[in-house]
């Protein structure tokens, strides 16, 4: 599976099957999944801590970032599964809101 060939639905089903095979559904409450996602997001920033913004990551740190980002996405997919959220719809809706909030003509080259 690679990004160009994998759908969100396929990833959601893989996560759902992983959780079900371990009988973890009772632990995957929206609250606990949101907390777990937050913990993993915190771990995601560790390789960047105390570095110059232009510093390149080592191969080990890149691998660590990949694993932590995967954890964030897995918990996000699990949360979407539990809440029966359509992620494509949610992402596209949010992008439309951000396009109105941060119009390109006013924010091009500027941090929000």
Image: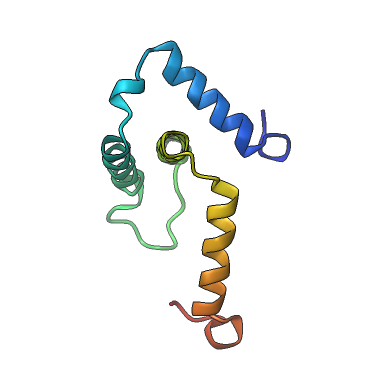
Report the residue at 40% width, 63% height from top.
53
Report the residue at 46% width, 52% height from top.
56
Q: Is residue 67 visible?
A: no
Q: Nearer the viewer, residue 105 or 23?
A: 23
Q: Nearer the viewer, residue 3 or 12?
A: 12
Q: How is the image coloured?
A: rainbow
Whole-percent x and y of residue 70? 46, 36
Which residue of the protein is positioned furthest toward the bottom in this rendering?
A: 106
Q: Nearer the viewer, residue 83 or 110?
A: 83
Q: Quadrant of the C terminus?
A: bottom left
Report the residue at 37% width, 13% height from top.
23
Report the residue at 54% width, 78% height from top.
100
Whole-percent x and y of residue 48? 35, 52
Whole-percent x and y of residue 97? 52, 70
Q: Is residue 90 left or right of residue 51?
A: right
Q: Is residue 86 visible?
A: yes
Q: Is residue 90 left or right of residue 69?
A: right
């Amino acid at each position: 599976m690679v990004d160009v060939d994998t759908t969100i639905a396929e990833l959601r089903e893989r996560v759902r099957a992983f959780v079900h095979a371990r009988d973890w559904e009772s632990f995957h409450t929206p609250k606990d999944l949101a907390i777990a996602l937050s913990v993993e997001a915190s771990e995601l920033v560790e390789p960047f801590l105390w570095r110059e913004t232009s510093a390149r990551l080592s191969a080990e740190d890149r691998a660590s970032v990949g694993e932590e980002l995967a954890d964030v996405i897995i918990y996000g997919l699990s949360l979407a599964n539990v809440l029966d959220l359509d992620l494509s719809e949610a992402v596209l809706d949010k992008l439309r809101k951000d396009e109105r909030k941060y119009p390109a003509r006013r924010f091009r080259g500027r941090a929000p």
